[in-house]
Amino acid sequence: AQKVTQAQTEISVVEKEDVTLDCVYETRDTTYYLFWYKQPPSGELVFLIRRNSFDEQNEISGRYSWNFQKSTSSFNFTITASQVVDSAVYFCALSDPNTGNQFYFGTGTSLTVIP
Amino acid sequence: GAVVSQHPSWVICKSGTSVKIECRSLDFQATTMFWYRQFPKQSLMLMATSNEGSKATYEQGVEKDKFLINHASLTLSTLTVTSAHPEDSSFYICSARDDRGTFYEQYFGPGTRLTVT
């Protein structure tokens, strides 16, 4: 069965600090997709990244970077030099093409960046 | 980019009444749409998978007669909460799966906040 675990429920950091949000997933499938979404207080999910299971290259986008390691089934997300606007709930999710691309969401990590 | 809209964005209704929430894919066709429910400070939980032209598939524990789903066209799915009760108050999010391409990219709507008084 598919499962996504975000062990960190809440994180607080001071502005300009770096922060890493952990995500561990479980799946028996060899083809799958991993995602990160940001959910600000407004509630709308903001897409951050999609990664397929065959692409283990790390990715950097501005202050955001992602570390995908199949060996440990992890897909961690790092925010460098955090800003107050980064305060939100972040969800990691797994999508399985074998079940119609149904999404399996983690429980989310609430990030608070303190000015 | 692909856009999914939801209407209304928020709604307050009285206990015992029904409320309909619409999910539309604005610039692509979506044979399949998904409905999620999110309680405060919790994750998104899949309620049902909506397929155009056929019956929705509900997740275990979701009452079919209470949460009526109609996927009438390739761009519209509706969720009707019947005989709403305060415990149905939640944030409802839909997503639409783009029929184009091989990956079937999925896009999320902005959500509908339902409050039942």
Image: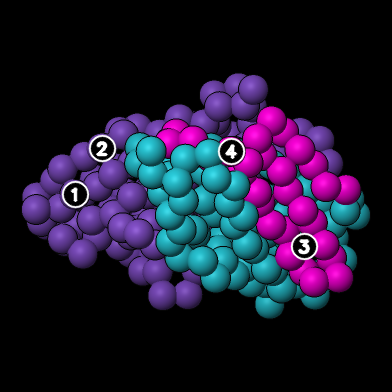
Chain colours: A cyan, B purple
Question: On residue B10, which mark appears?
Answer: 2
Q: Is residue B53 above or below residue A100?
A: above
> Which residue, given by chain and number where applicable, does mark 1 sit on?
B115
> Which residue, given by chain and number where applicable, does mark 3 sit on?
A98
Q: Is residue A74 left or right of residue A15?
A: right
Toward which corner of the image does residue B39 lie, by quadrant?
bottom left
Query: Along the polypeptide, which appears first: circle 1 or circle 2?
Result: 2
> Which residue, given by chain and number where applicable, does mark 4 sit on?
A81
Tag 2 subunit:
B
The mark closer to the camera, 1 or 4, is 4
- Callouts 3 and 1 in the same chain: no
Q: Amino acid at mark 1?
A: Thr
Q: CA distance from mark 4 to mark 3?
A: 38 Å
Q: Is residue A79 above or below residue B83?
A: above
Residue A92 colored in magenta in the image:
no
Q: Residue at x 38, y 38 (%)?
A: A115
- The image position of residue B106, as x and y in percent, is 64, 42
Label 1–label 2 contact, CB within 8 A: yes
The mark closer to the camera, 3 or 2, is 2
Please, what secondary structure does the residue beneath circle 1 have?
strand
Q: CA distance from mark 2 to mark 4?
A: 35 Å
Tag 4 subunit:
A
Quadrant (top left/top right/bottom left/bottom right) for the N terminus of chain A: bottom right
Please, what secondary structure does the residue beneath circle 2 have?
strand
The mark closer to the camera, 2 or 4, is 4
Q: Is residue B33 visible?
A: no
Q: Amino acid at mark 4?
A: Ala
Label 4–label 3 contact, CB within 8 A: no
